[in-house]
Amino acid sequence: MIFSAPVIALGATLGTALGILAICGLSLLCKSCKKGISEKDQESDLEKTQPSVFHSAQQFSVKKSTEPIQPRTLLKFPRIYRPKPLVTSPEVINSTDYTLETTDEPSAENTAEPDDSCLATDGSEEVFIIPRQDSKAAFAISGDLKKETAGGNTTPNPKLHFSLRYDTQTLELHVTVIEAENVSATQGHDCYITGHLTTKSGKREALTSIRRVTPHLLWEETLVFPLPEGYGIEGEIALSLFNCDKFSRHTNTGVMRFKLADVGMLSDADCWVDLQPPKQDPAISVGEILLSISYLPAANRLGVVVMKARSLQSDKLKDVIDLSVKLALKHQATKLKKKQTRRVKHKMNPVWNEMMMFEVPHKLLSQSSLDLEVLNQACVGDVQSLGRCAVGMQSTGTGLQHWQQMLNNPRKQLAMWHPLYE
């Protein structure tokens, strides 16, 4: 019992020391666990913050500045060569005025500031550019060669191939239109040939079919003109080439004429002629009117649509503009019926779009015609005529062409511009 108190004290001390050691070990263990968890979190954060397609690893800051930014040249421009002019004429090569200056190496100006027309390509490619007016590469052509070049650009006249034959049994002159060459499409993409026979007894006209303009046009069609008196009388034949465009405008692009007395010499011979530009018509048009006509054979009805007018030129339109169109249906020289459109005021290019119907038997169409007159009513009781035109078999030019197209295409509306004459 003597040693019981020291033993108890020693045991208590050892117990306290063991408790302290246990607490220290637990604290160290907790710290190590917390350190491991924090390292794992940092690794996962690093994986999340790694650069990818959608996330950039660098952060940029944009600062406003008034100073101009000079970009660095990242593209290497290829070497630029200027082409030598291709001149094949010996007159130019031997001419003293011919000068040529070229540079094999690009100039410093072109190297520093390449032209905007150059394309950035690989260094192995060669780019050729056309020199400008201020460029060093230039050449001069003598004045004589310029004249020859300018003369060579003229468009050749159209050529017509035809033949003549007079039939003594039927007393008819047959003009066969075979083909044509050098026909230009500038005045229209369709063309046809018209033949006019002029004698003391009157005028007669015949037309070929319409062809699409090509480098070589082939017709092989015969125009027949009755000549009961024979070709020994005084008269003239004119063959004209007409072009028509999509607006139904017909333009005479070439004509040739010969006397009836030459028919015997030209009979049964193939003739090639150059069509000459037509002479100016002394009658000057004072405007144009657009008409659409059609014929219904079952009902014997002739439909005329007065659409509009344009380019009206008259001193009578200075004060008052009150325009209308008067139509008259004629059988030979007799007027059968008259009609008139409404009046359009204050317009130099009036639009009517009015349809009028006339009852005409089919057998009378060949001897019927339409007379149109554009009127301006200056005041009450004062009606002034601005221009006239006629459509029918007895007409010429667009009036005859329009009427024939209507006869060949029944039940179809056909529109065409017609010139107006005082």
Image: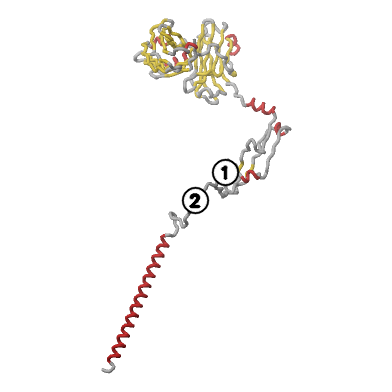
Q: Secondary structure at mark 2?
A: loop
Q: Residues within 10 Å of mark 2 (few under 14, many from 20)?
A: few
Where residue 183 appears, as percent x and y from the top left, is 55, 23
Where is the N terminus found, in terms of image quarters? bottom left
Label 1 vs 2, first from the N-terminus:
2
Q: Is residue 152 visible?
A: yes
Q: Residues within 10 Å of mark 1 (few under 14, many from 20)?
A: few
Tags 1 and 2 in contact by the CB under 8 Å rule? no
> Along the horizontal axis of the image, is 91 left or right of 209?
right
Q: CA distance from mark 1 to mark 2?
A: 33 Å
Residue 119, label in figure:
1
Colour pattern of the rendering: secondary structure
Query: Residue type at mark 2?
Result: Lys
> Along the horizontal axis of the image, is 232 left or right of 399?
right
Q: Is residue 366 visible?
A: no
Residue 63, label in figure:
2
Q: Nearer the viewer, mark 1 or mark 2?
A: 2
Q: Secondary structure at mark 1?
A: loop
Query: Residue type at mark 1?
Result: Leu
- Residue drawn at (63%, 46%) of the image: 111
Where residue 105 appears, as percent x and y from the top left, is 67, 45
Furthest residue toward bottom: 2
Where residue 318 appears, as percent x and y from the top left, is 48, 13
Residue 150, label in figure:
none
The residue lying toward the viewer, choosing from 41 and 238, is 41
The residue lying toward the viewer, choosing from 220 and 295, is 295
Q: Quadrant of the rendered structure where residue 23 is?
A: bottom left
> Would you place residue 181 above or below residue 130 in this image?
above
> Would you place residue 300 above or below residue 73 in this image?
above
The residue lying toward the viewer, choosing from 231 and 122, is 122
Where residue 98 appears, as percent x and y from the top left, is 71, 34
